[in-house]
Image: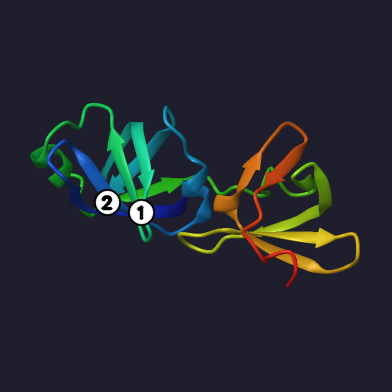
Amino acid sequence: MTLLGRVLKPHGLKGEVRVLPIESGLYRKAVGSVLILRRKHRKLSLKIEKVKRSPRYLIIKFEGINSLEEAEALRGFEIVGKEEKANPVEGKKAVAGGRVLGIVKEVLPIPMNPVVVIETYSGKELLVPMKFCMEKENVLEVNLPPGLEEL
């Protein structure tokens, strides 16, 4: 099992927790996904009810955790999962505004902000934060920030 993140503390009064992502695999977990939390000899399986991104953390609301006290009980738990071998976007065409930019070479697993490496057809590498990308059927739709492509 790979360490994906760590529950730091409660966030608010309604059962949300602040999570420090350690691996980029945690970003791909969506509402309805089940996460495995462990601490010493204790394991929990909790389903994500809601997830929000803040600049440095993820704020996650789990089903069945509805109070500050219940969220406090999760403090210090590690979030673990299976190691993901390859990123599903690798090898896809990257498209911006209907124009093909190149092929996704890899995704750099930078905590809190994974980066997509796109190899352009001119041989250059374009680095785009994952938050500007949306995976479609056979392509990665990229919403380039102003001035990024000119670099």
Q: Amino acid at mark 1?
A: Ser
Vertical comparison of 136 with 24: above or below: above
In the structure shown, which secondary structural element does the residue marked by tag 1 occupy? loop
148 left or right of 4?
Answer: right
- Relative to 42, is 55 above or below? below
Label 1 crowd bin: few (<14), some (14–19), many (20+), radius 10 Å: few
Q: Residue at horizontal 90%, vertical 59%? A: 121
Residue depicted at 84% across the width and 48% down the height? 100
The earlier-in-sequence mark between 2 and 1 is: 2
Q: Quadrant of the C terminus?
A: bottom right
Decide: marks 2, 1 in contact (CB < 8 A)? yes
Q: Relative to 68, is 19 on the left or the right?
A: right
Mark 2: give few (<14), some (14-19) or many (20+) Cα within 10 Å. many
- For residue 71, side relative to residue 123 (left or right): left
In 3D space, how far apart are the residues under numbered discs 2 and 1 (Cα atoms)? 9 Å
In this figure, which residue is indicated by the disc labeled 1?
54
Residue 139 falls in image quadrant: top right
Q: Amino acid at mark 2?
A: Arg
Extreme residue in the left direction: 69
Query: How was this image coloured?
Result: rainbow
Estimate the x, y position of residue 19 in percent, counting from the top left.
32, 52
Q: Residue at x 53, y 64 (%)?
A: 110
The residue beneath circle 2 is 18
